[in-house]
Image (tube, helix red, strand yellow):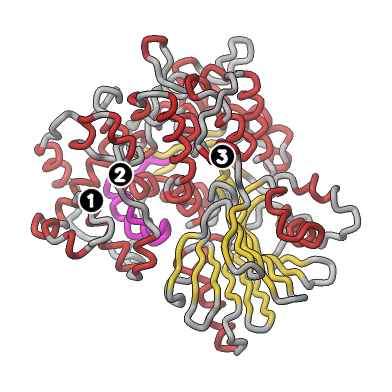
């Protein structure tokens, strides 16, 4: 993923303003360490920090049309760019970049071209012929993007909050599936799929259609000119991604460049469920597998950096982001620039363990719709920013537009979890790839119980975080929490600890409002908490909070002895960002 920053109509074309834009753009350099670009037209500025994955030789940005009157800065991948180029026979392209089609599509179709893009993207387009501009974000919000407004009448667009929070009077997350047009002076939704209305669909389940749609989603994401790999936790989702990628790896440019087998990566505490399952799947698929081990203390030492990069104080996002953040650094050190990951499956299939308690198919479907709509605040934010922190790109085939349409058109009765019929969570996905003749995965992996990433890396990870927060947040501080943090008041010491760090980096009210809140059980929405009366007294985003469902669920009353013992093993310090040595993470290949 790259980093973009645009300042539009700031009424200041001075050298000092240009220097300020460059300074702010450098805050995004971790996203694109390969090259930087800045275009200025009057009092508008488009800057770009590039991570070169497709056409690394000539795809530097900003990008232009033939006469350079249309200028684009973009973060993303356009998977159907070759098809789109063929639809523009009268245009000459300057580069082989997949994003080069955007300026030319605008010339032909105006603002109505965005839905033609099959991919993920955040971009700003400046038309210098009339000094108008257009900004857009992909359908689900896989790429991160923010919009802000300055007192001078300027509009700011940035891949991350840190690019604009100090210079805007107000800012917020740029909504997924929307575009902003200066001609209309506001936001407009361009992504309007049938499922968005949350009306219950009725299409029958066809396992072959589902399988083919997902294979296509994975294969199109093999588009790269640099070495890549797969994240492999050994769970259903990442294992299916790895299995399909391994089958098609030989035909990719990366395979020709590297002349080796597909690389896979897994992270966890010593002896964690994911490390064991990941290695088993890697051996089965024949990938070049890398295990990254970290300790609870390693993770705690990285928390400040994680919050700075992820830009949230949401508990479950920080829990899951930290191992991914550590792993991404090691992956990048091995020369890999892009990975394919399994985010999004649980939202579209209803794979979280709390879906076991969905009362009917209507509630089940409504919950999946709500989860997809909120992905940009949670798993997409994590996958994008935890990897981009080290100049690594993550691609997520489960959130392919076409694949989502296939899955969300299926009658949700097929997705319902029915133990009496041996239908566990994500049964229709498992069944679609349960091929005896051309096996994708070992049976016990194909039917492995859902394990949330922050749990799968090792159960003591979350327990250790809670114990660390106990050392730094007192009971007196919790009593004053509603007065100190009136919005999204922390309900636990862990949440309070994260909030303190977040507001040190991002103290603005606008920043605080970008983070969602509300009750949750095992990553549910607040509405789904009502599905089980016992959940309201056991609120925790961990999958182990789904009492009676998870095989290693929390006990009804957590032992205080466990927390005490964990606390004695954790260094009693609050780590300071940029003042500590590199985290120690061992690699086994």
How many neighbours does mark 2 have within 10 angstroms: few (below 14), some (14-19), or many (20 or more)?
A: many
Q: Main secondary structure of the magenta part?
A: helix
Instruction: Give the labeled residue for mark 2.
Output: 295
Residue 359: where, in percent of width, then height? 35, 24
Q: Residues under labels 2 and 1: Cα distance?
A: 18 Å
Q: Label 3's element?
A: helix
Q: Name the secondary structure under disc 1.
A: helix
Neighbor class of circle 1 (other Cα within 10 Å; few <14, some 14-19, many 20+) is some
**Residue wearing tag 1:** 494
Q: Nearer the viewer, mark 2 or mark 3?
A: 3
Q: Nearer the viewer, residue 204 or 578?
A: 204
Q: Is residue 234 visible?
A: no
Q: Earlier in the sequence, mark 2 or mark 3?
A: 2
406, 322: nearer the viewer: 406
Residue 278 circle label: none
Residue 504 visible: yes
Q: Is residue 97 above or below residue 250?
A: below
Q: Earlier in the sequence, mark 1 or mark 3?
A: 3
**What residue is pinned by disc 3?**
399
Q: Tell me what residue is drawn at x 68 percent, y 49 percent.
A: 115
């Amino acid at each position: 993923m790259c980093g973009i920053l645009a300042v539009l109509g700031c009424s200041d074309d001075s050298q000092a303003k240009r220097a300020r834009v460059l300074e702010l753009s450098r805050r995004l350099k971790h996203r694109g360490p390969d090259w930087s670009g800045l275009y200025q037209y009057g009092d508008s500025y488009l800057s770009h920090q590039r991570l070169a994955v497709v056409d690394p030789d000539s795809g530097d940005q900003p990008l232009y049309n033939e006469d350079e009157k249309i200028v684009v800065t973009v973060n993303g991948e356009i998977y159907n760019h070759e098809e789109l180029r063929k639809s523009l026979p009268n245009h000459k392209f300057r580069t082989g970049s997949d994003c080069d089609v955007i300026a030319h599509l605008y010339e032909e179709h105006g603002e109505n071209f965005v839905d033609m893009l099959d991919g993920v993207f955040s971009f700003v387009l400046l038309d210098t012929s009339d000094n108008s501009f257009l900004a857009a974000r992909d359908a689900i919000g896989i790429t991160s993007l923010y919009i802000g407004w300055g007192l001078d009448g300027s509009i700011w667009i940035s891949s991350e909050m840190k690019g604009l929070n100090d210079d805007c009077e107000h800012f917020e997350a740029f909504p997924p599936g929307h575009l902003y047009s200066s001609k209309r002076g506001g936001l407009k939704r361009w992504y309007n799929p049938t499922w968005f209305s949350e009306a219950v669909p009725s299409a029958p389940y066809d396992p072959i259609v589902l399988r083919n749609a997902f294979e296509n989603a994975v294969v199109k994401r093999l588009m790269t000119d640099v070495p890549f790999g797969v994240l492999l936790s050994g769970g259903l989702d990442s294992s299916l991604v790895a299995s399909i990628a391994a089958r098609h790896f030989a035909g990719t440019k990366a395979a020709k460049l590297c002349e080796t087998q597909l690389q896979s990566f897994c992270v966890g505490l010593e002896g964690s469920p994911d490390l064991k399952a990941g290695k088993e799947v890697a051996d089965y698929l024949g990938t070049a597998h890398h295990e990254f081990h970290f300790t609870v203390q390693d993770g705690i030492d990285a928390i400040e950096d994680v919050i700075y990069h992820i830009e949230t104080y949401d508990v479950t996002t920080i829990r899951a982001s930290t191992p991914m953040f550590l792993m991404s650094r090691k992956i990048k050190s091995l020369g890999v620039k892009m990975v394919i990951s399994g985010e999004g499956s649980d939202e579209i299939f209803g794979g979280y363990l709390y879906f076991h308690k969905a009362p009917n198919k209507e509630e089940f479907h409504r919950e999946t719709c709500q989860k997809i709509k909120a992905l940009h605040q949670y798993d997409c934010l994590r996958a994008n920013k935890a990897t981009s922190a080290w100049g690594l790109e993550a691609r997520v085939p489960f959130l392919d537009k076409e694949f989502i349409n296939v899955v969300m058109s299926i009658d949700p009765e097929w997705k319902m979890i029915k133990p009496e019929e041996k239908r566990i969570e994500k049964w229709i996905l498992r069944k679609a790839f349960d091929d005896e003749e051309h096996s994708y995965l070992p049976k016990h992996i194909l039917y492995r119980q859902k394990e949330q990433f922050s749990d799968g890396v090792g159960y003591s990870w979350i327990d250790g975080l809670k114990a660390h927060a106990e050392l730094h947040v007192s009971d007196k501080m919790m009593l004053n929490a509603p007065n100190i943090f009136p919005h999204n008041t922390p309900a636990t010491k862990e949440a309070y600890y994260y909030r303190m760090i977040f507001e040190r980096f991002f103290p603005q009210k606008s920043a605080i409002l970008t983070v969602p809140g509300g009750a949750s059980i095992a990553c549910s929405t607040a509405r789904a908490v009502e599905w089980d009366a016992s959940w309201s007294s056991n609120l925790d985003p961990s999958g182990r909070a789904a009492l009676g469902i998870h095989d290693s669920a929390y006990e009804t009353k957590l032992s205080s002895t466990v927390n005490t013992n964990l606390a004695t093993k954790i260094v009693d310090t609050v780590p300071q960002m940029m003042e500590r040595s590199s985290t120690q993470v061992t690699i086994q290949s």
